[in-house]
Amino acid sequence: MLESTIIIDGRDHLLGRLASIVARELLAGQKVVIVRCDEICVSGSIVRNRVKYTQFCQKRMNTNPGRGPFHFKSPARMVWRTIRGMVNQKTSRGQDALARLSTFEGIPHPYDKKKRVVVPAALRVMRLKTIRDYTVLGDLAASVGWKHKDLLKKLEDKRKVKAEAFFQKKKAKEELKKKAVAAAEGDLAKVNEVLAASGY
């Protein structure tokens, strides 16, 4: 069953596995937002992946390179392009599926206060042997010309401070609630008996 929008936290997922699962969901009609694309992983060392990306950058139209193929430098667009290759985007169905996808570096404003999920089948710790090298997409992007790694780190540090403050406040609230329930247990004993008898 389709949900309104699924927000996936891309941190420590493997790019290809995540992309194939997201592509299937998009084609089924699900809206998907992927945040923290800069922390998605690709198997293989950074040296190997840089060589592969350099070779990819050499693929261009002979007579007019301005017509493409376009080589995106930002992690979010790299993820978007990977998924584009999996949804058959030359058909109208594929174009509609791609329109349901949003990708972001970091966790921008509306999504930082919403529930995020992971995809266990695509997690690096579940799928990659511990002896294998892997590359973080943000590091690869920075090494091929993406210029916003430092800015993103600054914004993410600010967000994490706010998130920690919110979490501590939430914990304190839950503690107070527990204490209030414990204090009122004697008064509520009869009420609880009636509720239990009614199946609550």
Image: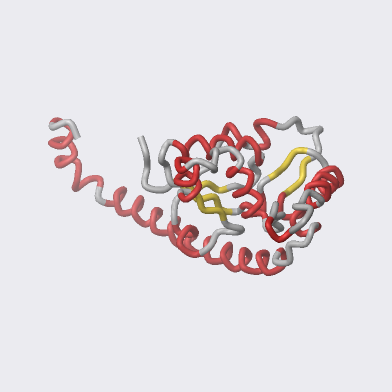
- Quadrant where the image shows the N terminus: top left
- Quadrant where the image shows the C terminus: top left
Left of 63 or right of it: where is 25?
left
Q: Residue at x 67, y 35 (%)?
A: 125
Q: Residue at x 73, y 48 (%)?
A: 136
Left of 103 or right of it: where is 141?
right
* Foreground pick, 200 / 43: 43
Q: Where does the image place residue 166, in percent across and percent down from the top left?
A: 47, 62
Left of 168 or right of it: where is 11?
right
Q: Where does the image place residue 100, in percent across and percent down from the top left?
A: 46, 49
Q: How is the image coloured?
A: secondary structure
* Foreground pick, 22 / 85: 85
Asked which quadrant contains residue 144, the reply is: bottom right
Q: Where does the image place residue 159, in percent across and percent down from the top left?
A: 56, 65
Q: Residue at x 50, y 41 (%)?
A: 91
Left of 11 or right of it: where is 61?
right
Q: Residue at x 29, y 49 (%)?
A: 181
Q: Where does the image place residue 132, in percent across and percent down from the top left?
A: 80, 34
Q: Residue furthest front?
A: 63
* Foreground pick, 15 / 129: 15
Asked which quadrant contains residue 123, the reply is: top right
